[in-house]
Image (cartoon, grey):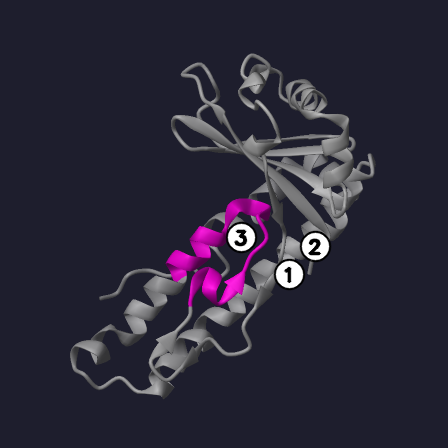
Amino acid sequence: MRRWMFFWFKLPRKDSDPDESFGRIAPGRMLAMIDRGAYWQCGCVIPKGGAEELRQKGIDAFRESIARLTPFLADRVDTLKDWTNVSLLTVQVNRLKKWSRPGLLCIGDAAHAMSPVGGVGVNLAIQDAVAAANLLGAKLRGNSLSDADVAVVQRRREFPTRVTQAIQLFIQNRVVRSVLAAEAPLALRLLNAMPLLRRLPARLMGLGVRPEHIET
């Protein structure tokens, strides 16, 4: 499913910058930022099909829009010399019907493409790997692994994948679309009015629907 896209780019990080990943939201604009230590990994959300329109306005206009949305980045947006410094990422949310076949098990992005919403793709991939180790480790060591054993990994991990993707699609279709249309979505108004509500999506996205723990 494709409803929107990312302009993906890097900007230098300074010691005086905030020390955590975060995002900036304003009517018609949305910027996600991930702290990579020496730099910020930035994703500017744009509607599907809107990339060419922004490119036609020029890199200067794009730099100015980033500086207005996140003022502390204004002194470094000029590191985006031209559009070769900005990559276009198409958002896709999907999953395989079957994660395994004889001699092969797909986990993480190989089994389920996640939206960048929440930055949880790596979380799910690691939890898939932990579940696979817990379920298959002993049989691998004992050289007794069967195709049926491998299929158990999908049965355990498909449910949290489906739930997480459903949350991502809800955010895409309701929140992101409203922001890009310069509207104030109800979900954001509720979160602003009731801070306690912020804990639930943060916990679901951060820890996962079914957290995995190393058992072997």
Which residues are the magenta region? 107-127
**51 shown above or below 15:** below
Q: Is residue 124 magenta?
A: yes
Q: Which residue type carries mark 2? A: Phe
Question: Which quadrant holds the N terminus?
Answer: bottom right
- Where disc 1 sits, the SS reads helix
- Where disc 2 sits, the SS reads helix
Depth check, mark 2 against mark 3: the one in front is 2
In this view of the protein, can residue 92 be seen by the observer?
yes
Q: From the top left corner, tell me how far across and down residue 62 is, in percent.
A: 69, 25
Q: Which residue is mark 2?
A: 170
Q: Which residue is mark 1?
A: 166
Q: Residue at x 62, y 21 (%)?
A: 70
Q: From the top left corner, tell me how far across and down residue 163 is, in percent.
A: 58, 63
Image marks 1 and 2: residues in contact by CB distance under 8 Å: yes
Q: From the top left corner, tell me how far across and down residue 196 is, in percent.
A: 61, 40
Question: Which quadrant holds the C terminus?
Answer: bottom left
Q: Residue at x 18, y 83 (%)?
A: 143
- In the picture, the disc for residue 204 is 3
Label 1 packing within 10 angstroms: few (<14), some (14-19), many (20+): few
Q: From the top left corner, tell me how far across and down residue 173 is, in percent.
A: 74, 52
